[in-house]
């Protein structure tokens, strides 16, 4: 089974806005025609829709017919891993200290972790 397209938050907003207009303004065929024209040089315009220029025809079709989901940022992936990992090793203070110190040394600030 084909997978949903992973996209940035900005691209997800653009797709959501575009597909919401599908019901009233555009059919799927019209959206694909507009995207084809954008790839040939017409370009999607506007603060929201300009992100659509990053998609190939195949990716636009995948987002349309299979769906899309927001790709987690590296920070979000870390927090998810950290929350899953830490309860699995209660009392392993050395391991947790290494994680904290590594993040500190690298100068990385992660909301929900050390910020």
Image: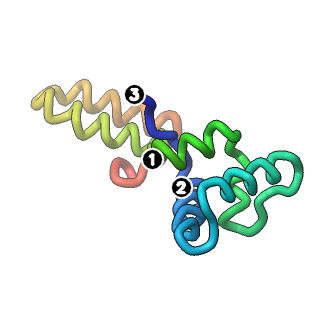
- Helix, strand or loop status at disc 3: loop
Mark 1 or mark 3: which is in front?
3
At which x and y percent is residue 50? 73, 59
Q: Which residue is mark 1?
A: 69
Q: Residues within 10 Å of mark 3 (few under 14, many from 20)?
A: few
Q: Does any portion of residue 71 appear in the rendered image?
A: no
Foreground residue, 87 or 107? 87
- The residue that appears at 68% across and 51% down in the rendered structure is 32
The residue lying furthest to the left in this view is: 91
Q: Residues within 10 Å of mark 1 (few under 14, many from 20)?
A: some
Residue at mark 3 to residue at mark 2: CA–CA distance: 22 Å
At which x and y percent is residue 102? 42, 31
Quarter of the image containing the N terminus? top left
Task: Using the image, tell me which numbered label, if any, was put on residue 1.
Answer: 3
At which x and y percent is residue 38? 80, 53
Residue at mark 1 to residue at mark 3: CA–CA distance: 16 Å
Q: Is residue 94 above or below residue 60?
A: above
- Helix, strand or loop status at disc 2: helix
The residue lying furthest to the bottom in this view is: 24
- The answer to whether mark 3 and mark 2 are in CB contact below 8 A is no
Q: Residues within 10 Å of mark 2 (few under 14, many from 20)?
A: many
Left or right, 103 with respect to 82, comes to right
**Residue 96, image quadrant:** top left
Q: Which residue is mark 2?
A: 12
Foreground residue, 18 or 54? 18
Task: Using the image, tell me which numbered label, if any, was put on residue 87.
Answer: none
- The residue that appears at 52% across and 62% down in the rendered structure is 16
- Helix, strand or loop status at disc 1: strand
The residue lying furthest to the right in this view is: 41
**Residue 31, image quadrant:** bottom right
- The answer to whether mark 1 and mark 3 are in CB contact below 8 A is no
Q: Of callouts 3 and 2, which one flags the residue occurring earlier in the amino acid sequence?
A: 3
């Amino acid at each position: 089974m084909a997978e949903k397209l992973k996209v940035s938050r900005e691209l997800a907003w653009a797709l959501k806005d575009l597909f919401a207009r599908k019901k009233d303004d555009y059919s799927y065929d019209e959206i694909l025609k507009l995207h084809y024209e954008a790839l040939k040089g017409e370009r999607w315009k506007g603060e929201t829709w300009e992100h659509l220029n990053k998609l190939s025809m195949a990716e636009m079709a995948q987002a349309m017919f299979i769906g899309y989901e927001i790709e987690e940022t590296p920070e979000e992936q870390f927090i998810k891993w950290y929350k899953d990992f830490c309860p699995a090793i209660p009392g392993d203070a050395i391991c947790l200290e290494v994680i904290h110190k590594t993040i500190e040394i690298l100068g990385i600030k992660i909301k929900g972790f050390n910020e």
